[in-house]
Image: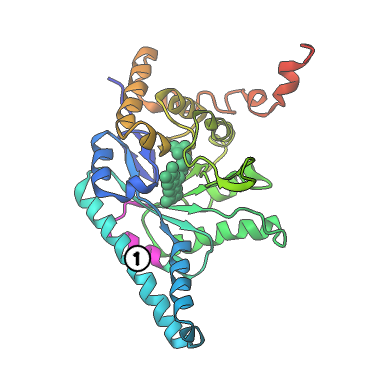
């Protein structure tokens, strides 16, 4: 029987299939089912830095007189942060007492400000690791790429200074020099990088002439971008990589492992097909490994990464190759 164990989050996981941070992983009952389905780890629903500040702003809008009082402001700020944090700490504690797989706390960060000090509390609550969901859409044209990248490096540095548990990051592909940023981030002391987080995207309703929200869930074809970058970066990064976005079945999970991922994180498929998707993916991976006579994940992980003489496939402008001479 194939051994599915792997290492990510600086931890030994019994399966490379991880339940990604999403609303399901903020619910104890679902977390229990995720563990029963054989997930290697669960990343809890994020504590949103943004949410904390929005809530603060809403309270202040209602009581405008307080906005001028710095002492009250500090108090308010403190109380609201404490309240959100305490809820999250309870979630970590309860999840830890319910399941025997690693429980990863997640923070969605948009700044590297003083919230990072709270990271210690997540560790104290018993989280096995922390995933930082770092996201800024680089749409502020007053900021150059260095200013944008600085946020990533500063946030990681501050969190690493206050915790001893492993810290991983989940990033977007929106960098002007993506490979180099991943390489430099991988050397900061973090335990892993997950490629790539998926934002709620805007879409357009042409009938109503209005902006709408695009599908919250990924489609199966979205795996190609993380596949390419996992394949390019896995042999070049100083820490393990995980892949997320568009992984809906065992075939795609296997592709990511072959490209060099140490784990895959799944969310959309849990909503679309139910939590049993995790056991199906595990079974599919094990079946394929048995057929191919691979005893462990390390026997084939990264076999089809860029290192293994596959640079052309990862880098070429394939339209030229595919359509050249075909008269398209
Ligand atoms: C309903 C929903 C809620 C999500 N909430 C979070 C979140 O709180 N924090 C986070 O880091 N990612 C969140 N994500 C992103 C997922 O963790 C995952 O990285 C992304 O959806 C790509 O994986 P998928 O293609 O399997 O959905 C959410 C995704 C979904 C579908």
Q: Which residue is mark 1?
A: 85
Q: Quadrant of residue 253?
A: top left
Who's the residue at 37% across and 19% down the image?
289
Residue 295 higher or lower than 44, as above or below: above
Q: Quadrant of residue 154?
A: bottom right
Residue 129, horizontal then vertical, whole percent: 36, 52
Taking the magenta stretch, the answer to whether it contains residue 318 is no
Label 1 SS: helix
Residue 127, horizontal then vertical, whole percent: 31, 54
The N terminus lies in quadrant: top left
The C terminus lies in quadrant: top right
Q: Residue furthest front?
A: 208
Residue 290, horizontal then vertical, whole percent: 34, 16
> In the figure, is residue 23 to the left or right of 207?
left
Residue 306, horizontal then vertical, whole percent: 59, 28
* Ligand 1 image position (quadrant): top left
Residue 95 higher or lower than 272, as above or below: below
Q: How many marks?
A: 1
Q: Residue furthest left?
A: 97
Q: Residues within 10 Å of mark 1 (few under 14, many from 20)?
A: some
Who's the residue at 41% across and 65% down the image?
162
Question: Quick check: can you spot residue 17?
Answer: no
**How was this image coloured?**
rainbow
Question: Quick check: can you spot residue 278?
Answer: yes
Foreground residue among 217 and 205: 205
Who's the residue at 24% across and 51% down the image?
96
Q: Is mark 1 within 8 Å of ligand 1?
A: no
Foreground residue among 130 and 276: 276
> In the figure, is residue 224 to the left or right of 281?
right
Residue 65 higher or lower than 44, as above or below: below
- In the image, the segment drawn in magenta is 118-129
């Amino acid at each position: 029987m194939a051994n599915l164990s792997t290492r990510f989050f600086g931890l030994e996981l019994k399966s490379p299939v991880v339940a990604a941070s999403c609303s399901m992983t903020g619910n104890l009952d679902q977390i229990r089912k995720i563990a029963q389905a054989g997930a290697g780890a669960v990343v809890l629903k994020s504590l949103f830095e943004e949410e904390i500040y929005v809530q603060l702003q809403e309270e202040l809008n209602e009581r405008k007189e307080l906005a001028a009082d710095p002492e009250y402001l500090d108090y308010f700020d403190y109380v609201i942060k404490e309240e959100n944090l305490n809820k999250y700490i309870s979630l970590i504690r309860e999840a830890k007492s319910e399941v025997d797989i690693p429980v990863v706390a997640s923070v969605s960060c948009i700044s590297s400000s003083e919230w990072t000090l709270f990271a210690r509390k997540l560790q104290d609550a018993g989280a096995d690791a922390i995933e930082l969901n770092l996201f800024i859409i680089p749409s502020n044209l007053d900021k150059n790429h260095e200013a944008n990248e600085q946020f990533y490096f500063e946030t990681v540095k501050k969190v690493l200074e206050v915790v001893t548990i492993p810290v991983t990051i989940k990033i977007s592909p929106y960098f002007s020099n993506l490979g180099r940023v991943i390489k430099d981030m991988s050397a900061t002391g973090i335990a892993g990088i997950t490629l790539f987080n998926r934002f709620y995207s805007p879409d357009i309703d042409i009938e109503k002439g209005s902006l709408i929200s695009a599908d919250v869930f990924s489609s199966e074809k979205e795996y190609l971008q993380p596949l390419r970058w996992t394949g390019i970066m896995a042999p070049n990064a100083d820490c393990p990589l995980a892949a997320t976005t568009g992984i809906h079945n065992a075939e795609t999970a296997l592709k990511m492992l072959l490209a060099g991922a140490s784990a895959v994180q799944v969310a959309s498929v849990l909503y679309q097909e139910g939590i049993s998707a995790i056991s199906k993916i595990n079974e599919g991976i094990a079946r394929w490994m048995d057929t191919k006579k691979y005893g462990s994940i390390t026997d084939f992980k990264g076999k089809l990464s860029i290192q293994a003489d596959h640079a052309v496939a990862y880098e070429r402008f394939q339209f030229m190759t595919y359509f050249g001479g075909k008269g398209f």
